[in-house]
Amino acid sequence: MQTHTSKTVILVTGSSSGLGLATADRLARNPAYRVYGASRTEPKGHVWRQVPMDVTDDASVTHGVEMILEAEGRIDALVHCAGNSIAGPVETTSVEDAKAQFETNYFGALRVVQAVLPRMRERRSGKILLVGSIAGIISLPFQAHYSATKFALDGLTEALRMEIAPFGIEAMVVHPGDYDTAFGYHRRMGARFDGASPYAAAFTKAMQFYDEAEKKGGAPDAFARKIEQLLARRRLPGKSIVGLPLELAGVWAKSVLPARVFEQLFRLAYYTP
């Protein structure tokens, strides 16, 4: 039975933890929104409506979106936060591990976008916000496949924006920097990585750097506040970069410095053993 709410119906994926949970929580406090959070597991104490969803499974995504459409008749906005990370040298990361990374971070996003678009297109309105990463602008050593998935979201969204514009639908990528969440804790190491690897020393230093940066990152609610601001805009920009001043400076430096100079500085800062 459809409730036909006058509120804006928003689907937030990856809502069980991290940026997805913070976003669902913040949007749910806005009286203008009705929020559905989608994830494989349900967090405790949430005030929004939970939808079971595994973004790596076609049937699960379809069923989750259909549940919302049956209840509400529409989905006005999608905020896709679901994702994970695998770490390891490119040389020793198996193709299977790389495929698994894309299955969640890229194809997971594609599944959800494809599921919400038909009803948005019929209604000739909708907003799609895909959460990328500054690692989708500056590729991270020893997280190459994670970075590649986030770069891929840029390419997907750039084409998608032009395809859906005639139907009154907008899409964008939001690239966050480091935030103080459990994302790093859940980062998975490539199955083939060996502690005796020639890359071991550089890998260890890089991962320590990433872990420390994430612990010093901003509060997840600051990111959620940015999402709320973007949803309130009449028009969505193609992308938005959200992070600490040093992270934003890094993005700027990459855009103006010769590639060799930028890479040398990056190696010195991040992972030269």
Image (cartoon, grey):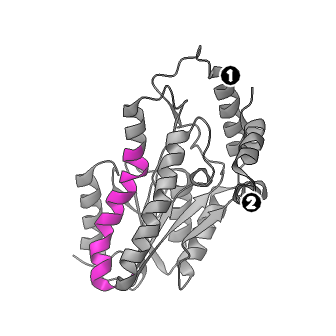
On screen, residue 210 versus residue 150, left or right, reads: right
Cα separation between marks 1 and 2: 30 Å
229 or 164, which is in the foreground? 164
Above or below — where is 119 with respect to 191?
Answer: below
Residue tagged by mark 2? Answer: 256
Nearer-N-terminus badge (1/2): 1
Q: Amino acid at mark 1?
A: Ala
Quarter holding residue 122: bottom left
Bounds of the magenta segment? 102-125
187 or 18, which is in the foreground? 187
Identify the element where label 1 is drawn: helix
The quadrant of the rendering that contains the C terminus is: top right
Above or below — where is 35 with respect to 200?
Answer: below
Write the residue at 51% across / 50% down: 17
Write the residue at 46% across / 22% down: 192
Per the rendering, the mark at residue 246 is: none
Write the residue at 74% across / 57% down: 244
On screen, residue 217 versus residue 240, left or right, reads: right
Above or below — where is 75 with respect to 201?
Answer: below
Q: Is residue 119 covered in magenta?
A: yes
